[in-house]
Image (tube, coloured by chain):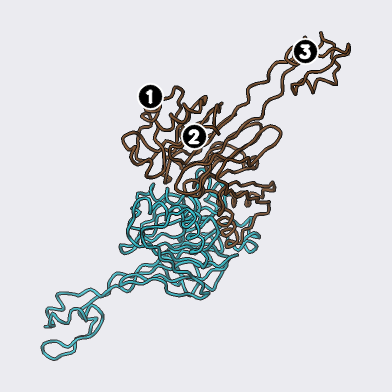
Chain colours: A brown, B cyan
Amino acid sequence: MKLNILGCYSATPRAFTNPTAQVLEINNHIFLIDCGEGTQVEIRRHKIKFNRIKHVFISHLHGDHFFGLVGLISTFRLLTREADLHIYGPKGLKEIITLQLKLSKSWTNYQLIFHELTNTSSEIIFEDEKVEVHTIPLDHRVYTNGFLFKEKEHERKLDMNAVLNTNIDIAYYRKLKQGFDVVNEDGITIKNETVTHAGPTPKSYAFCSDTAYNEAIVPIIKDVTVLYHESTFLEKHAKLAPKTKHSTAIEAAKIAKMANVGTLILGHYSTRYDDLNAFKTEAETCFGTVELANDGKVFEL
Amino acid sequence: MKLNILGCYSATPRAFTNPTAQVLEINNHIFLIDCGEGTQVEIRRHKIKFNRIKHVFISHLHGDHFFGLVGLISTFRLLTREADLHIYGPKGLKEIITLQLKLSKSWTNYQLIFHELTNTSSEIIFEDEKVEVHTIPLDHRVYTNGFLFKEKEHERKLDMNAVLNTNIDIAYYRKLKQGFDVVNEDGITIKNETVTHAGPTPKSYAFCSDTAYNEAIVPIIKDVTVLYHESTFLEKHAKLAPKTKHSTAIEAAKIAKMANVGTLILGHYSTRYDDLNAFKTEAETCFGTVELANDGKVFEL
């Protein structure tokens, strides 16, 4: 699992900072999460192949989270993309994109598949054999979802010595990997845990931006490997957080602690701050493992 | 008159080139012409004050000419702009912008005034005491206008020695500047040209992008000081020009020659070319004064 921070600042793009966009690489998927203005250029800078992006997740319809999407879609068209593109985001996004493509007479040759979200409770919006994506309803000024990306349980690993010693037919190996007990050639039931051990722990990533402090998300993101939680403000501007429905670094850390996450990554900083270290310092007063997102930073998880 | 090239490449923004956007400074106006994705960042880089931009001219609704507009409008809002913003562009632009502002619940505090264009012949769309802006109907795949920015005739300058020697009452000076003959204190008619001389020659700038080779524009842009004419292709790809309704460097030069312009600036290069010098070389086979636009370049006219 690898997380590319393309942009992690709030509000407005500047010469050296970008609005929100991330690329999560997980189990051979390349998921684009949010798409502020300029995201397509950042994708190029990160040398991520456009064609590998098949799923885009948009948290909400504030410009710093989606104004780059229509340009990305158009660029895909100009580069003669053929693969389908799935777009998950709030109702209204389809209308915004299709209106612009229609008026510019630039309809895509490839299939654009919109999955418009309206649900206010968590739901599963993508699933294949290895990965699931769930929404995380957030508390912001407009309808907003975070996204939880989680690997499914890995198969159990065979302990080959034990398996061979217990005279199990090869036809049952699959069942063993799936966790079942099996009967061996001698008619004896072999307990699964005596011949297998657990596969690697499934990893998970929760993206939560933008949101006010919201304990309701804790059960959804419980025990995730990595939580990206917005921290627009430092303590000195804490009063602005509930007013604008954003969070402080300490609030992000409180959520991380309650949810028992592995690592907390902070981001979506207000552009009023020149030095980001205070975000880490403040969050660490409440939670141990804190990282700072920054544009261009890559987290190998 | 000063022209800031914020972006001058066609099609798709890349790490080191930007789609079309220009800022023309003329008689104390700051006119923004086209607004591809990322334009607001380029405006910042050029240190042009956001508040001084009161008029935006959009040539057509292909993304590389307007996808940055909604972000610019939103940034103006975040920076608590109060001044009106006038937007001139094809019908449909208002719907695109207002839909996005509505769905993001981010209506502007300042006034957005749309001047939607539908006319297929040249019309005057802005005028004050010193400057006029006319449309230049272009021939592209969607409804497209270029824009002609021209200073009005400057007042004539008084030749003060001559004026004082001919015994003209001060009340008539204004009429003299306007070019009229006047009667002096002795009842004698004084010919205007004997006591005044011409003011500076009015400057003019024509922006023509995107367009196929189109001689119909020649009378509109006749004798302009500077013509920016798109030259998407070199001769080796000349066949693509009519097909995509773009121009070659030589076609741009032919138009410049026919219109007897002062200087031709080339731009809107296809991103397939690494070296721009061939554009200049090819255009110069047909017209003498050719300049190459490039991102970040400033022309003092």
Q: Position of residue A128 (x, y in %)?
A: 70, 36
Q: Nearer the viewer, mark 3 or mark 2?
A: 3
Q: Which of the labelled discs sits on residue A160, or is there none? A: 3
> The numbered mark 1 sits on a residue in which chain?
A
Q: Which of the labelled discs sits on residue A285, or is there none? A: 1
Q: Classify residue A241 as left or right of residue A177.
A: left
Q: Which amino acid type is marked by label 3?
A: Met
Residue in the picture at 58% in, 40% down:
A122
Q: Are marks 3 and 1 in contact (CB under 8 Å)?
A: no
Residue under numbered circle 2: A296
* Quadrant assignment, res A51: top right
Q: Position of residue A244 (x, y in %)?
A: 39, 45
> The numbered mark 3 sits on a residue in which chain?
A
Q: Which of the labelled discs sits on residue B132, or is there none? A: none
Closer to the chain start, of discs 2 and 1, is 1
Crowding near the residue tagged with mark 2, few <14, some 14–19, many ≥20 C-alpha atoms within 10 Å: some
Crowding near the residue tagged with mark 3, few <14, some 14–19, many ≥20 C-alpha atoms within 10 Å: few
> The numbered mark 2 sits on a residue in which chain?
A
- Pick the residue in front: A267 or A260: A260
* Quadrant assignment, res B234: bottom right
Element carrying mark 3:
helix
Residue in the picture at 88% in, 13% down:
A185
Residue in the picture at 29% in, 69% down:
B200
Instruction: Find the distance from the CA under tag 3 to the CA under tag 1.
Output: 47 Å
Q: Position of residue B60 (x, y in %)?
A: 52, 63
Q: Which amino acid type is marked by label 2?
A: Gly
Closer to the chain start, of discs 3 and 2, is 3
Q: Residue furthest bottom?
A: B187
